[in-house]
């Protein structure tokens, strides 16, 4: 299996400084270059920035606005307690319980699993604030590729002012579902789910639940729909399997159905995103040499629930710890330190049939609520 090493980068001055360049600029040097300023990249930059020169780049404008349900599970919340999350991150209701809903089998089960309900944009901006000022942060900067030798990796970037080549000891790919670093490590493409989500006016009667909704009549390729209240709005998203056709039309069908059933208001914004398809532990790729993958870019996303924030926080930090502990052989150390999360992915992948087939939903409907809640927390 290929494995890669990655470099982290330093936090900075929004594009000004020695790394601001055009395509004719000389090569810059850092100790670590991190691609992706989400939870995994920020955790890696936070730890590495205290010990080395780090460059953190993201293709989006920062603070970014990532389409996401914005729900922190108990594992994420426990990890984040050390940083004191501020109150402004939370939306009304501040906590939502997970509910299974199946319109066809009349399944409606409220579990004891609770999520913290946050604004994803505010959350990502807060994570950036945890990074040391020594880390240089560049937004609107796209990773193009790399070449490695025994000692250094040369990374090609596209910045708002032109091309840039950065020499680095380590590269960390934390660039999510459509990771260009993962693509270079694998030497090919990989499958992703598609998600379309609408922000709508929230009805006063909407209960404080994070609903996972199964609707049989939407057609091939529709995996499930989720709905959650977010302050004065509500978020409704449809997830589609790789290769699904007519996604917009099917999501429109879902929205019409839910407007009737939930009393949703008109759509104010529509977004789309991708999620990595992980169906076994073999989809977890740690990297190659000193190019390391972390978070969803590595395959750390729940195969059953699509939850990835808790994995991103944990593995981003573990990746940085591995580099600091074993600077000459970080990949082996990282793989060993991340064995627990990797086994967790494998266990969850084995439960996929329970969620993907009608018989599985019949089992969910028949489970005692205590057992259903216990099982849901492990999805």
Image: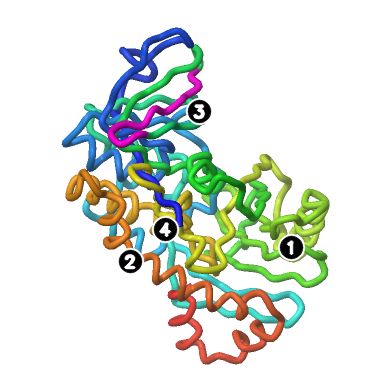
Q: Which mark is residue 346?
A: none
Question: What residue sits 44% from the left and 50% below the top?
Answer: 118
Residue at the spot of label 1: 222
Specify whether residue 126 is in view.
Answer: no
Q: Secondary structure at mark 2?
A: helix
Residue at the spot of label 2: 339
Query: Which range is magenta?
Result: 149-159
Q: Secondary structure at mark 4?
A: strand
3 or 1: tag closer to the N-terminus: 3
Of badges 4 and 3, nearer the viewer stands: 3
Residue at the spot of label 3: 142
C-alpha gap between disc 2 and disc 4: 22 Å
Of badges 2 and 1, nearer the viewer stands: 2
C-alpha gap between disc 3 and disc 1: 31 Å
Residue 228, x across and y down, in percent: 57, 58
Q: Secondary structure at mark 1?
A: strand
In the image, 191: left or right of 343?
right
2 or 1: tag closer to the N-terminus: 1
Check whether the beta carbons of the residues at disc 2 and disc 1 lie within 8 A of each other: no
C-alpha gap between disc 2 and disc 1: 32 Å
Residue at the spot of label 4: 72
Q: Nearer the viewer, residue 223 or 267?
A: 223
């Amino acid at each position: 299996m290929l494995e890669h090493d990655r470099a982290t980068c330093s936090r900075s001055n929004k594009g000004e400084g020695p790394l601001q360049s055009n395509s004719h600029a000389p090569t810059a040097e850092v100790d670590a270059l991190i691609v992706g300023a989400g939870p995994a990249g920020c955790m890696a930059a936070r730890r590495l920035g205290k010990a080395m020169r780090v460059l953190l780049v993201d293709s989006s404008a920062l603070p970014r606005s990532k389409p996401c349900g914005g729900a922190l599970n108990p594992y994420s919340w426990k990890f984040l307690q050390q940083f004191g999350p501020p109150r402004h991150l939370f939306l009304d209701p501040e906590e939502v319980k997970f509910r299974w809903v199946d319109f066809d089998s009349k399944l409606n089960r409220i579990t004891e699993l609770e999520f913290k309900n946050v604004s994803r944009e505010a959350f990502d901006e807060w994570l950036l604030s945890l990074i040391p000022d020594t880390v240089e942060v560049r937004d609107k900067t796209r990773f193009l590729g790399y070449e490695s030798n025994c000692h250094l990796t040369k990374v090609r970037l596209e910045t708002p002012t032109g091309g840039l080549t950065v020499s680095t000891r380590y590269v960390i790919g934390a660039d999510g579902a459509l990771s260009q670093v993962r693509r270079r490590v694998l030497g090919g493409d990989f499958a992703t789910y598609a998600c379309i989500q609408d922000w709508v006016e929230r009805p006063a009667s909407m209960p404080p639940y994070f609903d996972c909704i199964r609707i049989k009549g939407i057609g091939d390729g529709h995996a499930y729909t989720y709905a959650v209240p977010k302050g004065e709005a509500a978020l409704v998203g449809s997830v589609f399997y790789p290769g699904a056709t007519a996604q917009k039309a099917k999501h429109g069908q879902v929205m019409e159905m839910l407007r009737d059933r939930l009393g949703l208001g008109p759509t104010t914004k529509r977004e789309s995103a991708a999620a990595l398809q992980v169906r076994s532990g073999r989809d977890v790729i740690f990297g190659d040499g000193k190019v390391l993958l972390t978070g969803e870019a590595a395959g750390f996303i729940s195969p059953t629930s699509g939850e990835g924030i808790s994995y991103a926080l944990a593995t981003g930090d573990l990746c940085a710890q591995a580099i600091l502990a074993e600077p000459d052989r970080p990949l082996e150390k990282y793989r060993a330190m991340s064995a627990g999360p990797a086994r967790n992915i494998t266990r969850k992948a084995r439960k996929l049939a329970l969620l993907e087939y009608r018989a599985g939903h019949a089992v969910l409907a028949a489970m005692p609520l205590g057992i259903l809640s216990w099982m849901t927390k492990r999805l």
